Amino acid sequence: MELFHAPGTVALASLIALHEAGLPFTATLVDFGSTQQQSKEYLQTNPKGRVPALVCDQGILSETPAILAYIAALVPERELAPRDPFAFAKWQEFNSYLASTVHVNHAHRKRGHRWAKQATSLEDMASQVKTTMFESFALIQEHYLKGPWVMGGQYTLADGYLFKAASWLEGDGVDITTLPRIAAHYEAMKQRPAVQKALSY
């Protein structure tokens, strides 16, 4: 497998997942500084022009929840995703919330041009990021993070995804210490060998 990634992006969750799974893969850097993600060559891999993109024997996956579910399914013995159908659906509910709400909230700070063009609109969106990010993580802390891991006592690949999303808090103006259970999870994640390997790219 080949994972296309870029530093500082949500692709970190997929890097962590591959290391947690112990699967062989090649990590290929996409240089956002030179807008390589918009190059003709990369768009053939991922027409969205974003990362991550995971090239597999069967095809290409390009959304984090899908990539995490696929990686977990390749190594069921590691129990990196719940096996029970309802628990798995709740797991994907959480991953989908990170993708559809938390990531979008975060993107309003620097990527408001995806939704608006007027300077006042961009400023207004950016001004709400601190509030929307805090509210989203307060909800996660109260309703999703069972502790010590997202799904309770069993570590899953959702934890790497939460770790990456939590890394945005400081830049978005949220003091992570005001979310003590999120902060404890973040610190615990930093100790995992797979996370340390993923952060070294």
Image (spheres, rainbow, N blue to C red):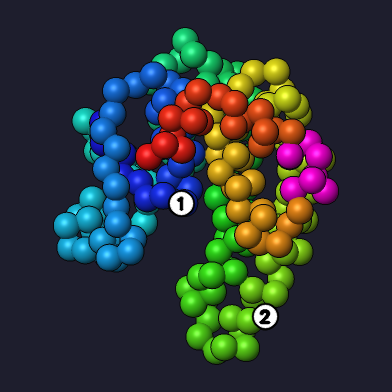
The three-letter code of the residue at mark 1 reads Thr
Which quadrant of the figure has residue 164? top right
Quick check: can you spot residue 11? yes
Vertical side of 27 occupied by 74: above or below: above
Check disc 2 and give the amino acid type: Asp
Rendered location of residue 69, percent (x, y): 46, 31
Taking depth in this image into account, of 164 and 41 the one nearest to the observer is 164
Q: Position of residue 159 (x, y in %)?
A: 60, 32
Tell me the crowding category of disc 1: few under 14, some 14 to 19, or many 20 or more residues within 10 angstroms, Cα based: some
Magenta: main secondary structure equals helix
> Which comes sooner in the sequence, label 1 or label 2?
1
Comparing labels 1 and 2, the label whose residue is closer to the camera = 1
Which residue carries the number 1 mark? Answer: 9
Residue 104 spot, x, y in % from top left: 57, 60
- Image quadrant in which the N terminus is located: top left
Judged from the image, the secondary structure of the residue bearing numbered disc 1 is: loop
Residue at the spot 64% in from the left edge and 75% down from the top edge: 125
Q: What stretch of residues is rendered in magenta?
A: 176-183
Closer to the camera, 151 or 184?
184
Residue placed at 71% from the left, 71% from the top?
Answer: 128
- The reply to whether the magenta stretch includes residue 123 is no
What x and y, as percent, mark residue 132?
72, 62
- Name the residue that disc number 2 marks: 124
Judge left or right: residue 86 versus residue 78: right
Distance (Cα) linking label 1 and label 2 = 24 Å
Q: Residue at x 73, y 39 (%)?
A: 183
